[in-house]
Image (cartoon, rainbow, N blue to C red):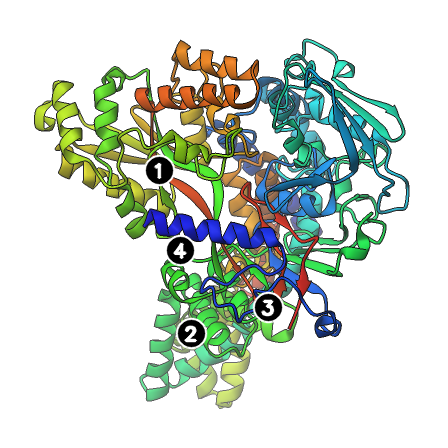
Amino acid sequence: MFKYTLKRICSMLITLFIIATITFFLMHSIPGGPFTRERVLPPEVEKALNEKYNLNAPLWKQYIDYLGDVAQGDLGPSFQKTGVRVNDMIGQGFPVSAKVGLLAVFFVLIIGIPIGIISALKQNTAIDYVVMIIATIGVTIPSFVIGAFIMYVFGEKLGVIPAGGLESWKGYIGPIIALAGFSVAFVTRLMRSSMLEVLRQDYIRTARANGLSKVSVIGKHALKNALIPVVTYVGPMVASILTGSFVVEKIFAIPGMGKYFVESVSNRDYTVIMGMTLFYAAIYVVMVFIVDISYALIDPRIKLQD
Amino acid sequence: MKKKLVSFIMLLTAMSMTLAGCGSKKQEPSTNQEGQIKPGNTSSVEQVLRMNLGADPKTLDPQLNSATDGSHIINNTFEGLMREVGGELIPGMAESYEVSEDGLVYTFKLRDAKWSDGEAIKAGDFEFAWKRGANPATASEYIDIFTSANILNAAKIAKGEVDVSELGVKALDEKTLQVTLEQPAPFFLNLTAFPTFMPVREEVVGDEAWAKTPEKALSNGPFKLSEYKMGDKLVLVKNENYWNAENVKLEKVICEMITDFSTAHTKYTAGELDINEFIPVGEIPRLMAEDDEFYVLPKIGTYYYAINMNNELMQDVNVRKALALAIDRTQIVEQVSKGGQIPSTGFMPEGIQDAQGNDFNEKAGDFGMSETADVEKAKALLAEAGYPGGEGFPEIEILYNTNDGHKAIAEAIQEMWKQNLGINVKLTNQEWAVFQDTTNNNAFSHLARRGWIGDYLDPQTMLDIFESNNGQNIGRYNNPEYDKEMQLSRTSTGQERMEHFYKAHEILMEDMPIIPIYYYVANVMVNDRVQGWELNAVGKFWFGDVEIVE
């Protein structure tokens, strides 16, 4: 296990390095730079800015310098927010996004999994149909539509939730529904189909034939195996939900980090683009690692290869 | 349409000049229009103003700021030698000033004023701030404003030819500041109210984050920063050390950073915001018609299409004029942009006056351009250029940055040119930064969308961008006659100087290297309980005279 973990950490670092490299050069290849303005900057000022942010160095030098800083945990200064470090932007934005995100993940799991199971056990009954219709709708409606709808109806017309902001607990309702909506529906469908698949397996029949109770068979034997596809999906989903959503945070005026993913690209804030990408990628690879470990815990047939 | 709007705008300006109650749109005298507010009436009302700032400002540092959101804050946390309120220039940090006979040397006497930490404000603080802004090493995006102000050596310093210590500003003693200009600049005084010219304290600016760090953000205006939450909100509180603090009624200004227009508008209608400029375009026609808390205010700026003068087809003045005349501007503002914008038949927006008090826009006239399309004349011009009925005219391209509003206008113009001139237009959009790169390098084919917002109330702020050596001249318009008039304006004063601007503007409109479309306006919603607010023509809020009433 120790050897396995070590090996995985190495491969994660290599993955991050490759992501950083590709992003760095792609980013520099798009036209326009951080100091491209509608109001053209005087050449001397542009020169001073390029010097200040090390943009006049050859690209390979900038790349090496940047990686050197990242290795020391410094993601550099933002080019667009004077005096602000990328580390601070993540440090202030991530906790906010993660707080809303964790709650959303919690609801995805406690709603999606049980309903999926019930739906599978009651296959082809009225309950199953209703659940599947709702879940299909949930998968097809994008989060910004859900978000805007909630905001309009409950925020503007009925006034039962605040019009943006997280000052009161009611402020969390809208963003959580918008963030969790798709995943709840998806997890429900996934759980249902996976459960149905497992219930058809021979060993389930054997267990039942051996006189084990239905509850015990489903709870102990079927559930564990049926969870594998769900866990596969949930890992990356957690990475994406925790780092915030541009659209949902914008609609509900949440000061999270979701906006930086989009803003930094449109204003060519190079260090922020890199910082956000690396941060997201890091959470992602860690989540994938956790998923792999949990496979072994859930299903004894899966062995982690050293 | 125009007349009505103009008179309405004038009315609003006049009302905001009284600075007591900004009038409601319906002009019913019943709603707190009277200048005086009974003191007993308001004592119980909490003096807190909540506004939406939109995005998190890039910086709140007077010399480094170049954005409107930053200006809203800086205009209230800092104060220059002068201050512009209600269209008038009033003494700020300067108690009085003298101008030498040749108009070149200004000597300012500072009043006994204090920084927010209680330290006295010295002339040296101004000298330091101005030299900081004019120094290319500081990388102020507004460095050119020192050149526009004609301050001695500013242009050479900006080019790196002369050391910044040679800038024509000097603290003679603690309370006397002397400024030397290269040429008399009548609007120099107005510029001393501009953020880039506001003082800063040398000991705090070393830390780049100072202006957003409440403990370090020393300021000298009516308010000071008390809280800053990245991407969330910032809070200003009354600066008790402000020289005129006894007349500042507001205790606190909460500035939220809500970027989503409909969320911001919902917050406003729910009463959670008192001031909001971020209003969904779809709501504006209704609000304009029926909501008396919705204001359309003048703004010094023009929305236009730059023509690439290096393109052979576009080098024919008749082609350019035909295109300009075939646009129905009234239709664009009424049915496409719908925000109360004003059709532009010239480049100079309303609100800039000449030395005799005439409105430049009015006196300059319309150069034969009507607000609606002049189809016959446009057709004739195109025929004269050799394309009768649009025959043989190649397809031309309008380039704009990706945005629904710009797209809608481009589509309307595409249709008008097709209908009126029989020519085909291709619309191309580019992402913002790519678009800037293309247009600033003159790499667009025929026409590119552009907007220009003036910095100060003087024709120069609008006209110098078309000089042949100006970086903003993306179409590469080059007429020595135009340059000459602009140059002459720099060495003359008073109405004579203005005549050069009139002449330059006339040359511009004769040559038509741009197609003006409309003059910008500011749309803002302000709750009636906010009295004495001002959003001036160069787009900055002033809260120093605000009082919240019930």
User: Answer yes or no: do the residues labelled 3 and 2 have beta carbons within 8 Å?
Assistant: no
Q: Mark 4 vs mark 1: which is more N-terminal?
A: 4
Residue A161 quadrant: bottom right
Q: CA distance from mark 2 to mark 1?
A: 71 Å
* Disc 2 residue type (three-letter): Val
Vertical relation: B513 (above or below) B346: above
Q: Is residue A182 visible?
A: no
- Chain letter behind tag 1: B
Q: Nearer the viewer, residue B382 or B460?
A: B460
Q: Which residue is mark 2?
A: A198
C-alpha gap between disc 4 and disc 3: 20 Å
Q: Secondary structure at mark 1?
A: loop
Describe residue B460's horizontal placement relative to residue B317 as left or right: right
> Are the residues under marks 4 and 3 on the same chain?
yes
Residue for point 44% across, 39% down: B350
Q: Which mark is residue B281?
A: 4
Helix, strand or loop at mark 3: loop
User: Who's the residue at 60% across and 54% down the image?
Assistant: B18
Residue B272 circle label: 3
Residues at marks 2 and 1 on the same chain = no
Residue B214 versus residue B142: which sits nearer the camera? B142
